[in-house]
Image (cartoon, helix red, strand yellow):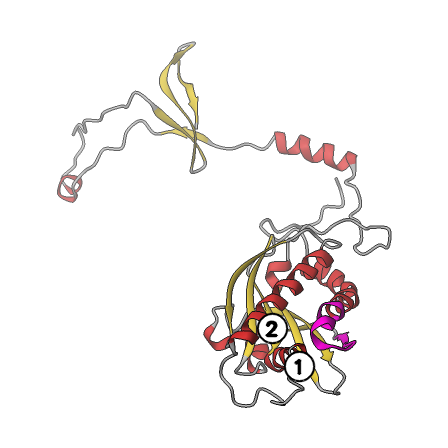
Amino acid sequence: MQNVQPYSFGRPANHPAVAIGGMEKLGDRLARRLRTLLEPYSGCRPAVSARPLDDTMFMMWDACVPSLVSLSLYRFHPIKGMVALRVDADLVTQLVDRFYGGGNARGGVGDRREFTPTETRLATRLADNIISALVDCWAEIAPIEAVLVARETNVSQANVMAAEAEVIVQSFEVDLGDRETRLIEIVYPKDGLAGLEVAGAGSRGTIEQRPPADPVWQAALDSRIEDVCFPARTVLARPNLKIAELVSLKAGDVIPIHIARHLPLLIGDRVFAHGSIGEQDGCAAFMIEKLA
């Protein structure tokens, strides 16, 4: 074991870049799924294109979000933290108008601060369909389970994550044929992607496969670990003394103690077992009666 490399215990097993690389490659596939989802509502073949992933801070993304937006918050197990789905309010309004034959009479969101009941229903249905498609696409990277946490129409009123948190934003531009760009965005916590168990390389090599462990190195490591020593101790008694009694102690004083029937066997600071004190071969001994 000559080529020893330092390792920080507690560090995530995977770097976020592993999952982020897979997300980049799945962007075009998800864009095609979004195009299929929007077509029945838009009455046309919408153009949906994936933007490059944006590695930024949550407060930078938050500052660019309009005051009225369809925001759905999810837990993507096993990704740690909150995942947010943003759908522009103007996109929701246009889809409602086209689906029900409004003919774009309202033109846009304007200064409105809330959705109509019809827009709310469509935004909810659209968000559920987008998340379902997203989960299917993520299957190539890692299996995830989406759990809805809340829906909001204003980011400032939503408890998403800390302003300084690093996020990965996956954006899709939607053109309904009027040369106006609306956005659909998924915001991931960057730290939550670290440690995600990604799938091995498939037929198209989406994710690089980890090399197998060296059996010689593994056997040597197992042998070394078996020789690691831990201090074992027990505590016979813990008498309580008042400060006045403590300061008045002198040589020859006797402190009465009570030895319990069952004593703990401590490995480090953790109780490993319980047992009793006895004698074996003329030496004091500890007999384990129950493992903790």
As measured in the structure, the alpha-carbon distance from the residue carrying label 2 to the one carrying label 1 is 25 Å
Mark 1, residue position = 101
Mark 2, residue position = 86
Left or right of 272 on screen, residue 205:
right
Circle 2/circle 1 CB separation < 8 Å: no
Which dot, 2 or 1, sits closer to the camera? 1
Q: In which quadrant of the rendered view does residue 194 lie? A: bottom right
Q: Which residues are magenta?
A: 35-50
Which badge, 2 or 1, comes first in the chain's sequence?
2
Left or right of 249 on screen, residue 9:
right
Taking depth in this image into account, of 246 and 272 the one nearest to the observer is 272
Taking depth in this image into account, of 159 and 247 the one nearest to the observer is 159
Q: Position of residue 285 (x, y in %)?
A: 40, 17
Which quarter of the image is occupied by the N terminus? top right
Q: Does the stretch in magenta take in 43?
A: yes
Q: Position of residue 127 (x, y in %)?
A: 61, 67
Extreme residue in the top direction: 281
Classify mark 1: residues with Cα within 10 Å, few (<14), some (14-19) or many (20+): few
Taking depth in this image into account, of 185 and 253 the one nearest to the observer is 185
Q: Amino acid at mark 1?
A: Gly
Left or right of 23 on screen, residue 288:
left
Taking depth in this image into account, of 125 and 277 the one nearest to the observer is 125
Q: In the rendered image, is residue 101 in sight?
A: yes
Extreme residue in the right direction: 203
Q: Amino acid at mark 2?
A: Arg
Q: In the rendered image, is residue 161 in sight?
A: no
Mark sitting on residue 153: none
Depicted 92 relative to depicted 141: above or below: below
Residue that appears at 80% across and 49% down? 209
Q: Position of residue 246 (x, y in %)?
A: 18, 40
Q: Which structural element holds mark 2? A: strand
Depicted 56 relative to depicted 281: above or below: below
